[in-house]
Image (cartoon, coloured by chain):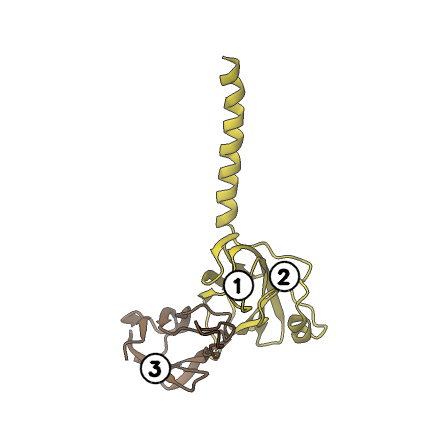
Chain colours: A brown, B yellow
Amino acid sequence: MADSRVSVPKEARRGEPFEVRISIRHPMETGYRTDESGAPVPRNVIRRFTCRYGGAPVFAVQVTSGIAANPYFRFFVTARESGALEFEWVDDAGVRGEARAELTVA
Amino acid sequence: MRATARLVPGRRRILRAAAAMLALRALPAIAAPELPDIPLLSQFLAGRAARWERLRLTLPVLADNGLAVPLKLAMAGPFAPGPTVRAIRLFSEKNPVPGMAVFEFLEAVERIEIDTRVRLAGSQKVVAVAEMSDGALYAAAAEVIVTIAACLDGS
């Protein structure tokens, strides 16, 4: 599913922080809206976003409807070893999304 | 002649005001010493005092649209080998969900910078609180004027 875009540098220097940017396609439905017939649209927002690096969780966000639709996060992670960055998120409907990027540490 | 002479200072004043406004927009929010009334924030602090320093919270002074307002968090290091940042919490004064987000640093990092986009249900103060590994708290606040609020309240 092409429901996210991730930007991670190809290479990073050991011990130094590198920038991670991710934008996820998600309506972040607040649950306060109604549809054309007046029926409430159930809340469906991403609840938790996690970033794992080399298998270990390094950064996470407890997300609410206070985060805009199509959530965007930019943050830093410390470079340790070459490996994968794995991103995972889950919404109110229980739908999980994931993304992945490879990083080479010099 | 007289009309021109009177116009010139007027124009200068306008230009100066415009320049000041531009400068203001670019400046990071200055930490407010008095906390806005957010019950969830008081509950979280539970009497603990947060220092209004180091942490920076940047929001535009004026947001045209509350549906997606760019928000920046930054904290000046160095951290290690001293206390590192564990989490940064965002509190909203007016949103129906006052706890907007919690950013968790599960592994220590020397560069604390977060960018995201938030929803704001109207003009309000937003407060950020950083929790350090030694339990110390740092806080920052920003006030934002929202022209069109995010439709969070069903209206």
Residue located beneath label 1 in the image: B120
Up/down of A12 relative to B141, above or below: below
Amino acid type, label 3: Glu
Tell me if I can see residue A31 in this picture.
Answer: yes
Up/down of A74 relative to A97, above or below: above
Which chain is mark 3 on?
A: A
Up/down of B24 relative to A49, above or below: above
Residue at x 31% of width, y 76% of height: A3
- The location of residue B134, given as percent across then percent down, is 61, 76
Which is more foreground, mark 3 or mark 1? Answer: 1
Residue at x 50% of width, y 63% of height: B150
Amino acid type, label 1: Leu
Residue located beneath label 3 in the image: A98
Which chain is mark 1 on?
A: B
Residue located beneath label 2 in the image: B52
Amino acid type, label 2: Trp
Q: Nearer the viewer, residue A39 or B92?
A: A39
